[in-house]
Each structure stands twice: as C-alpha cells, then as structure tokens.
Image: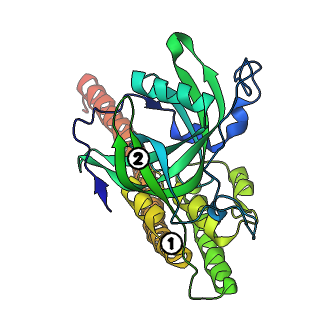
C-alpha cells in the first residue's frame, strides 16, 4: 500500500458521521429544508473535467469514462476512512481549510478526492476515490454538512499545493480486463454474494437480531455487474480500513472478488465457531441452572430434617422416657 508523505500535515479535524448512517441516504431527504439542493442564487459552473467510470454504475456499456492517462488537478480530503465507488459518505465540515475547499467546490466543481490516511504509518495513501457532493447544508459559522457519493478512483502523481488545502495531480485508475470470461466473473460474484449472506445471517443470529432482517439480504447484488458489486462488498468491510484500501487499489475485478470471498469465508468460519461455542455455553448454563435447583431442594430437605430432629430432641428433654 503506497503512502504519500505530507510534511507539515496537520491532523484532520473534520468529523465523519456515524458509519451506519451513510448506508441509507433517504434519511436525509424526508426532513424539509434540510438541504440546499440548488444554490440560493444563480451561479456559473465551470465545465466538469471529472466523469464517472464504469466502476461507479451498473450499466454494461460506458462511453464517457475518463482515460487512465488523463491528468487533472483534484482537491484532496485525507480521512481515516476508505471511500469506494458508489458508496455514500456523510461529512460534517468545520475545519477552516476544508470549509474553504467546500465553498470553492460549490461554486466550481462538486468533486474532490478522498484518500485514506493511516495514523500508524504517518502518511496518506496514493490511491483514493472521487467524492461528489450530492446534497449539502450550510450550518452555523460557515460549517457544512455534506452527503457525498463515491465516483472514480484515482492515483496521486504529485502534490500541486498544500495551502489553503491539499491539491494534487491525479490520473484515473480503472480495472484492467480480466483474463477470464464475463460469465466466470458472474460466477465468482455469485459466490461472494452467497458468502456475504451467510455471514450476515449468522452475525444477526449471534447478535440476537430478529429473523425479519433476513428479508433485507435476499438480493444483496441488486443486478450489479461484477466490478461495482466488488466495490459494494469492499465498502461493507467496516473496521478494516487497511484491507479496504488494498481492495480499492486492485486493478483486477476477479482478483478483488476472490480476495473478498476469502475474507468472507474466514469470517464465516469464525462466526460458525463462535456460534458453536455459544451453543455449548448455553447448554452448560442450562445444566448449571438445573444443578442449582437440585441443590436448593436438597438444602430445603436438610433444613426440614434438622428442624424435625431439633424439635424431637426438645420433646425428649421435657418428657424423658421412664
């Protein structure tokens, strides 16, 4: 995983909304006047040199995908989070330099680059994903709340400037054609979907969630083609940003799907073992409860016997036998 070294790179202070909230963007459309879908005043928008790739959408044919050798300048937003094409990302912007970036984006281009920054490695990765602002709300003190969607992947070739915010020259990153046939990719994608369903079901059962939740996972793929589906699966590997970054950087859909399948298989084996252990634990708990009941009954029997013997001894003292 290639890292970019940023000298004098201040820690990011713009916050990321709870990960779970970004899975359903409809939550943000029901409250009136929450978002400014269009600007409050007319403005001229510069031509957008960034166009979505085939990886971002489920359609089979794309004619407007940018070429991999195209080089453009792109504002960068380092985050401890990996954005995938097609994924929804909510952001609250309050750091001054990023507020400047957002104000510029809203008047020019609605896209910026999200790159994963690893605090342990003291640097940011060279491969990221374009985030497009699809909704925004201006908050107090010129802060912003954004809803963004992942679009094209890119690779940073060089930093253009670092102030007032990061800007880099980037080239586009697209999956190379796989050596196998399309039907082979579909078969691998189907296997990944099956493993993912098994993991979700077993995880729900271990967490005590209702079985009605299973209805929500009947069609995880939703007619997605293998490449966008591989990004969808990668976006669900929450809590493992380094693995997500490795998946994002891969340029072969088949390799990405197989790696995801292996990860899901390992997760399924772990959950199966945890489920079996929980079953044994519950059985042992039931046996312990039965043993406790038996001991309480024996204790009561012994107490009654002791009371009887004590009373009999007292009677004998009062009425000694002749």
Q: Are marks 1 and 2 in contact (CB under 8 Å)?
A: no
Q: Report crowding for label 2: few under 14, some 14 to 19, many 20 or more residues within 10 A (C-alpha).
A: many
Q: Can residue 175 be seen in this view?
A: yes
Mark 1 or mark 2, whichever is nearer to me: 2
Q: Quadrant of the N terminus?
A: bottom left
The residue where tag 1 is placed is 256
Along the viewing direction, whichever of 154 and 270 lies nearer the viewer: 154
Q: Which of marks 1 and 2 is nearer the N terminus?
A: 2
Q: Is residue 240 visible?
A: no
Where residue 214 appears, as percent x and y from the top left, is 70, 57
Question: Which residue does the image show at 53% across and 32% down from the upper left?
Answer: 91
Answer with left or right where residue 300 lies relative to residue 236: left
Answer with left or right where residue 109 lies relative to residue 276: right
Answer with left or right where residue 77 lies relative to residue 209: left
What secondary structure is found at the residue carrying circle 1? helix
Q: Quadrant of the C terminus?
A: top left
Vertical comparison of 194 with 156: above or below: below
Query: Gap between marks 1 and 2, in whole Å?
Result: 27 Å
Question: Which residue does the image show at 55% across and 71% down from the upper left?
Answer: 175
Where residue 170 appears, as percent x and y from the top left, is 45, 54
Mark number displayed over residue 168: 2
Q: In which quarter of the image is residue 20?
A: top right
Where residue 299 appears, as percent x and y from the top left, is 35, 42
Question: Which residue does the image show at 55% across and 23% down from the upper left?
Answer: 144
């Amino acid at each position: 995983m290639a890292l970019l070294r940023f000298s004098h790179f201040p820690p990011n202070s713009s916050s990321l909304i709870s990960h779970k909230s970004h899975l359903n963007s409809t939550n943000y459309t029901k409250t009136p006047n929450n978002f400014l879908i269009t600007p409050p005043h007319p403005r001229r928008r510069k031509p957008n040199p960034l166009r979505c790739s085939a990886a971002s959408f489920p359609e089979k044919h794309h004619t407007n995908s940018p070429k991999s050798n195209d080089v453009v300048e792109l504002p960068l937003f380092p985050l401890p989070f990996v954005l995938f094409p097609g994924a929804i990302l909510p952001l609250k912007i309050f750091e001054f330099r990023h507020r400047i970036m957002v104000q510029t984006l809203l008047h020019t281009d609605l896209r910026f680059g999200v790159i994963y920054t690893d605090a342990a490695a003291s640097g940011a990765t060279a491969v990221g994903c374009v985030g497009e602002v699809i909704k925004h709300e201006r908050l107090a003190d010129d802060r912003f709340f954004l809803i963004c969607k992942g679009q094209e992947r890119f690779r940073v070739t060089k930093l253009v400037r670092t102030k007032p915010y990061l800007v880099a020259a980037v080239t586009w990153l697209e999956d190379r054609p796989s050596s196998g046939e399309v039907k082979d990719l579909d078969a691998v994608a189907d296997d990944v979907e099956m493993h993912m369903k098994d993991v979700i079901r077993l995880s729900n059962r271990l967490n005590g969630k209702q079985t009605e939740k299973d209805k929500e996972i009947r069609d995880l793929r939703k007619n997605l083609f293998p490449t966008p589906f591989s990004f969808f699966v990668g976006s669900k590997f929450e809590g493992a940003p380094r693995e997500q970054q490795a998946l994002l950087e891969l340029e072969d859909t088949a390799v990405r799907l197989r790696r995801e399948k292996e990860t899901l298989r390992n997760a399924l084996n772990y959950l199966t073992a945890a489920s079996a252990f929980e079953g044994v634990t519950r059985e042992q708990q039931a046996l312990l409860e039965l043993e406790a009941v038996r001991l309480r009954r024996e204790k009561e029997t012994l107490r009654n016997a002791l009371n009887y013997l004590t009373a009999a001894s007292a009677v004998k003292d009062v009425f000694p036998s002749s």
